[in-house]
Amino acid sequence: MMKLEIRSIAAAILLTAVSALAQNNPEAVGVDKTTILGPTVFKFDQLPVTKNATGEVRSVVKQPTATVDQLEMHITTLNPGQTSHPAHRHVNEELIIMDSGECETLSDGKWIKVTKGDIIFNASNSLHQFRNVGKVPAQYHVINWSPNKDKK
């Protein structure tokens, strides 16, 4: 029951963020990173694909909003046997939503298997890592944000 509630809450957060981006703006990637992000829809098939050693990334946005210093979203395809990056920490909080595949995430010091529909929350400054333990590429959506420290 708890997993379903967390999944529903995270999905609602994602839908709210994406729904708030309400009109088509295919040029959103690469816009002035100091401009406050307004209503926008990001079309998956219009996002530039960057291939890398572990798979590929579709960068969605990296820009301030009215309530956070930076909203960063991307969609990663991670090849089998690959790790997205070494274990690390950062101040921003992060949601990872599994779209397909079979991965493991380092969360609270433990490796936990995640699959389609699972949602990972990486708290501020928590040590985390992500790896594809499946036999096919895994795809997941990453949403992270840094708080707006100037606003109370």
Image: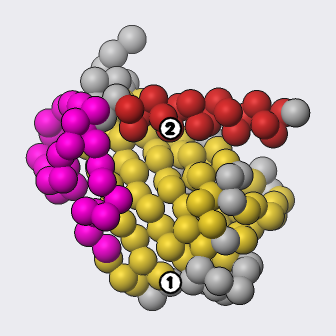
Q: Are marks 2 and 1 in contact (CB under 8 Å)?
A: no
Residue 54 badge: 1
Q: Which amino acid does label 1 sit on?
A: Thr
Q: Does the magenta stretch include residue 23?
A: yes
**Image coords of residue 43 (percent x, y):** 30, 54
Determine which residue is flagged by label 2: 14
Q: Which amino acid does label 2 sit on?
A: Leu
Position of 4 relative to 59 (above/below): above
Q: Quadrant of the C terminus?
A: top left
Q: In this view, does 36 lie to the left or right of 136?
A: left
Residue farthest top in this picture: 152
Q: Which of marks 2 and 1 is in front?
A: 2
Q: Quadrant of residue 56?
A: bottom left
Q: Residues within 10 Å of mark 1 (few under 14, many from 20)?
A: some
Q: Quadrant of the N terminus?
A: top right
Residue at 78% x, 50% y is 108
Residue at 34% x, 29% y is 20
**Image coords of residue 38 (percent x, y):** 21, 31
Q: Which of 141 and 25 is in front in this view?
A: 25
Q: In this view, does 79 lie to the left or right of 62?
A: right
**Image coords of residue 70 (percent x, y):** 33, 40
Q: Quadrant of residue 87?
A: bottom right
Which residues, given as a range, are shown in magenta? 22-49
Q: Nearer the viewer, residue 119 or 147?
A: 119
Residue at 28% x, 42% y is 41
Position of 28 relative to 58 (above/below): above
Q: Is residue 63 magenta?
A: no
Could you tell which of marks 2 and 1 lies nearer the N-terminus? 2
Query: Can you see residue 64?
Result: no
Q: What element carries label 1?
A: loop
